[in-house]
Image (spheres, rainbow, N blue to C red):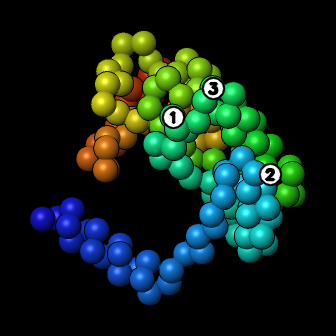
């Protein structure tokens, strides 16, 4: 019941101040949409369970695009990704070898793995990424 209440609360917030939704190909529209964001705000690019719908070449293009987005539009951009293993090899390489990543997303901030996240917010675990020598 708590999840239903949380979902209803979130839906009420969105209904009170609906976000702008821009249709289009993320590889073609991201830079223009980002450039139109309010100038004084930190721009956050967030996605969850999206990149597996792209082929390997498109995933690489997206990663390169979002990594260079700040320079392209002249402002700070934070990239938060929530994707499964097998999406980007450089992210997979950051997941501790002894960690159980099954049925979990790997959450990253600016292409750095920081946590496992469960489906629909059921889990958020940073411990595997806090090994000696790693900072979350």
Identify the residue shown where x is 80% and y is 43%.
Answer: 68
State the residue position of label 1: 52
Identify the residue shown where x is 75% and y is 51%.
Answer: 28
Helix or strand or loop: what does disc 2 sit on? helix
Query: From the viewer's perspective, is the residue at label 1 or at label 2 nearer?
Result: 1
How many numbered marks does the figure carry?
3
State the residue position of label 3: 56
Q: Nearer the viewer, residue 60 or 79?
A: 60
- Determine whether, in the image, residue 32 is placed left or right of residue 56: right
Q: CA distance from mark 1 to mark 2?
A: 24 Å
Q: Quadrant of residue 3?
A: bottom left
Identify the residue shown where x is 58% and y is 26%.
Answer: 88
User: How far across and how far down the image is residue 73, in percent?
Assistant: 85, 57
Residue 94 in sight from this viewpoint: no
Helix or strand or loop: what does disc 1 sit on? helix
State the residue position of label 2: 70
| Mark 1 or mark 2, earlier in chain | 1
- Determine whether, in the image, residue 133 is placed left or right of residue 11: right
User: How far across and how far down the image is residue 74, in percent?
Assistant: 87, 57
Q: CA distance from mark 1 to mark 3?
A: 9 Å
């Amino acid at each position: 019941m708590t999840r239903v209440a949380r979902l209803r609360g979130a839906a009420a917030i969105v209904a009170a101040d609906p976000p702008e939704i821009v249709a289009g190909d993320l590889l073609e529209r991201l830079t223009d949409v980002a450039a139109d964001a309010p100038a004084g705000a930190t721009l956050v690019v967030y996605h969850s369970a999206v990149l597996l719908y792209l082929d390997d070449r498109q995933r690489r293009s997206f990663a390169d695009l979002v990594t260079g987005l700040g320079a392209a539009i002249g402002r700070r951009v934070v990239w938060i990704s929530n994707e499964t293993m097998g999406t980007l090899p450089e992210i997979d390489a950051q997941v501790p070898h002894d960690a159980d990543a099954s049925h979990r997303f790997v959450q990253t901030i600016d292409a750095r793995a920081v946590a496992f996240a469960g489906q629909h917010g059921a889990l958020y675990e940073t411990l595997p990424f806090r090994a000696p020598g790693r900072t979350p």
